[in-house]
Image (cartoon, rainbow, N blue to C red):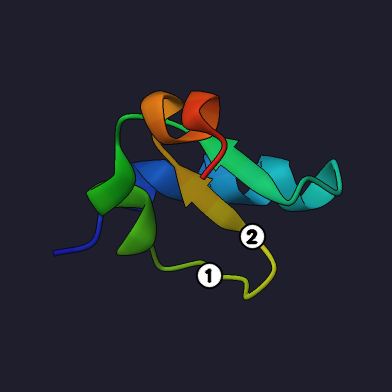
Amino acid sequence: MKDEGDNFLIALAVVENSNLIITNNIKGLREAELTFENLKIQTPETFLRGE
């Protein structure tokens, strides 16, 4: 089941022209109803390592 509560984060990122969401909720956001090809989702650890 997809978590509709995660959709607001994706919508906010798109409205603000972001290309990256940094979160520990990787699974929840990758399975969200809203998806955009140019929007990357990373954990804080991955972001800090520069991956």
Foreground residue among 51 and 25: 51
Q: Is residue 51 above or below residue 49?
A: below
Please tell me the numbered disc located at residue 39.
Answer: 2
Q: Nearer the viewer, residue 36 or 3?
A: 36
On screen, 8 above or below 47? Answer: below
Element on which disc 1 rests: loop
Q: Residue 2 sits in which quadrant?
A: bottom left
Residue 49 pos. (x, y %): 48, 30
Please give left or right for residue 25 compared with residue 1 in the image. right
Q: Are marks 1 and 2 in contact (CB under 8 Å)?
A: yes
Residue 37 screen position, x and y as percent: 63, 75
Q: Which residue is mark 1?
A: 35
Q: Quadrant of the N terminus?
A: bottom left
Q: Regarding mark 2 in the picture, which secondary structure is present there? A: loop
Which residue lies at the image location 29% right of the left edge and 36% below the top edge? 25
On screen, residue 37 versus residue 26, left or right, reads right
Q: Residue furthest left?
A: 1
Residue type beneath disc 1: Thr
CA distance for labels 1 and 2: 8 Å
Q: Say left or right for 21 vs 27.
A: right
Q: What residue is rendered at 65% in x and 50% in y?
A: 11
- Left or right, residue 22 beside residue 23: right
Q: Bin the neighbour count of mark 2 within 10 Å (Cα to Cα): few under 14, some 14-19, many 20 and up.
A: some
Percent position of residue 16, x then y: 85, 41
Placement of 24 over or under 34, stated as above or below: above
Q: Label 2 sits on what residue type?
A: Leu
Residue 48 x %, y %: 52, 24
Q: Measuring 57% from the left and 56% from the top, which residue is drawn there?
A: 40
Please state which of the two labelled residues, at mark 1 or mark 2, is closer to the viewer: 2
